[in-house]
Image (cartoon, rainbow, N blue to C red):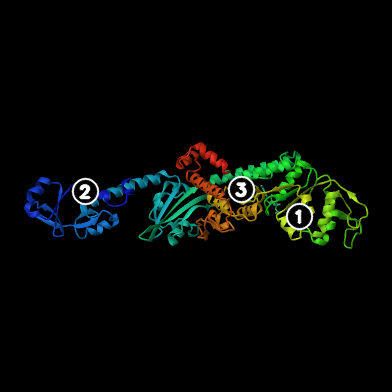
Amino acid sequence: MAFFQSGIKKFIRNDFILLENKIEDVDLHSLIKSESPKKVFIINEGQRYVVHLSDSTDQIIFSTCTRISVNTELEDVSSFFDKSETLLVHDGGNFIGYINAFDFTKQLANTYQEMQAYFQTILDTIDASCTVIDSNESVLIWTEGAEKIFSVKKPDIIGKPITNFFNTDNLALLKTLKDGTSLHHSQHKAREDLVVLINSSPVYLNKQIIGAVVSETDITSQIRLNNELYSATEKVFNLEKEVNKLMPTDDPFKLIRGNSSALKRTINMTKKAATTETNILIHGESGVGKELFAKAVHNIREGQNAPFVAINCGAIPSALFESEIFGYERGAFSGADQKGKKGKVELAKGGTLFLDEIGEMPLEMQVKILRLLQERKFYPVGGTKEIEVDFRVVAATNRDLKELIKEVKFREDLYYRLNVVSLEIPPLRKRPEDIIELTHYFLYEISIKYKRPIHGISQTVMRALLQHDWPGNIRELKNVVERLVVFSDEGEIKIEDIPFEINGMELPNGRKTSYPSIFNESDNRSLNERLQEFEKEIIMKELEKEDGNKLSCAKKLQVTRATLYNRMNKLGLKI
Ligand SMILES: Nc1ncnc2c1ncn2[C@@H]1O[C@H](COP(=O)(O)OP(=O)(O)OP(=O)(O)O)[C@@H](O)[C@H]1O
């Protein structure tokens, strides 16, 4: 399309003859006649002329002409015609042609018509509505799409102020016109029965806003379908829960979501560890899923119906520890329940005692627990009869127990008793590919919990979640998703609701961003891990650009489709 080429090249004519100096030797009269219709230019003593013969007198007429560079902007050309009707064009000093005012105007008019034709066809082709207003808020363009969405006919609205037809408060277009705000894919309830996705942009000319354009797509039916899908999903979810109650699933890892190789490795090790009767110690940062893994071990070893009794060793005050764990006899101490109370150990009979945050257990209790683990017998507080009980132990900690041993805060003998088999649950930053599956899983679960249908999650939000460091691991991710669902509007998750600073990303509200996480100073991951994150970003970005089309994406990245699938698989991207 010629008019999209910027610059003046298409207006330059090259049917010309240029005579420089020494014109005395030339018979100008015959030259002009013989070379007609070529234009003849003369450069003499630094002056430039275009010469032609007068129609009436056949005399040579000299008209001065202006010299312009081939790089002159199109919009600046007309100002040169104030000085002369013909412009001699040079490229780095060499004259390459000329532009005359008559041709220029004619071609501009042609270009304008061409543009109009394309422009009109674009407007007639798009389904979405397109509305354009000028700086006086009058409607310049109103497409068929706009007629359909807003039931206002084009002849009725063209040339009239848009505010005659719509409530000012509801007009994104006016805001765009006034302060230059752009919108992209912003969901908006235009009427009670109409939901649209809006894009809007100001029109700038010479750094001034001269109008605004808005395009709206009716998504009411998508929203309705999504709501129907949501109610169906909710029913399936509840039915699934009922079925699980009646026929418990035999997959002990069902609640552990994620597809990363790091997680798969941990699951495999857990399966092996759970084939033994022995004590298991689970290490891992806060919120990585230690309790979920402890439960999985329990489900494999003892079965779901056996008791799983968890004690958070960091949450029980020292004074109550013994009675909590071992229970107490009737009247054991003042304020105690008169009937006495079974301790956690007794409750875990035939099942699993899960000692969470074992590193926080008071030293004086550690010796009692050690004896319990060695002898499987204990005295309730105030009791005289020893109770024998059979149970398995799984302990968990996010502390470095060896360090605590050095600081004399943890008993070495207890450590070796608990740590017969140890499992390490990797933090989320070592398996970022799990973030995608976990996010979708939590979105689904939480949207049902709050009865708030969600229409999906944009690539921008997902990218922000993928780039975050997640010190609180999966619990933190779950909380963030919960927040996004709670603050969602009309099923739309908003990037503004992300409660942490977003790396290397431009936000609509101009919130400050920092560098991508692969460049963070605190990033201790290997080169390979960082490269994988980068690769993942590239693939996700290209897929987004290609609307999810893998073949086009593979072509763009110059790999085969099979290679793209392999890489996506390896990087844990959903195929
Ligand atoms: N892989 C996973 N899939 C689904 N949910 C998970 C996963 N891992 C953890 N969660 C969820 O994250 C939250 C924290 O998990 P959990 O309590 O098991 O972690 P933890 O390591 O024991 O935490 P803490 O260190 O605080 O004791 C829970 O809501 C749990 O259901």
Q: Which mark is residue 431?
A: 3
Residue at 90%, 59% in the rendered image: 332
Q: What amino acid is found at the position of numbered circle 2 in the picture?
A: Arg
Q: Is residue 201 left or right of residue 481?
A: left
Residue 354 visible = no
Q: Which mark is residue 13?
A: 2
Q: Is residue 271 left or right of residue 173?
A: right
Q: Earlier in the sequence, mark 3 or mark 2?
A: 2
Front-most of 310 and 527? 527
Residue at 39%, 51% in the rendered image: 141
Q: Earlier in the sequence, mark 1 or mark 3?
A: 1
> Where in the figure is residue 25, as x and y percent of width and height?
7, 52
Q: What amino acid is found at the position of numbered circle 1 in the picture?
A: Ile
How far apart are the alpha carbons under marks 1 and 3? 25 Å
Position of the N terminus, as image quadrant, is: top left
Q: Is residue 501 left or right of residue 307?
A: left
Which residue, given by chain and number where applicable, does mark 1 sit on? 358
Front-most of 277 and 101? 277
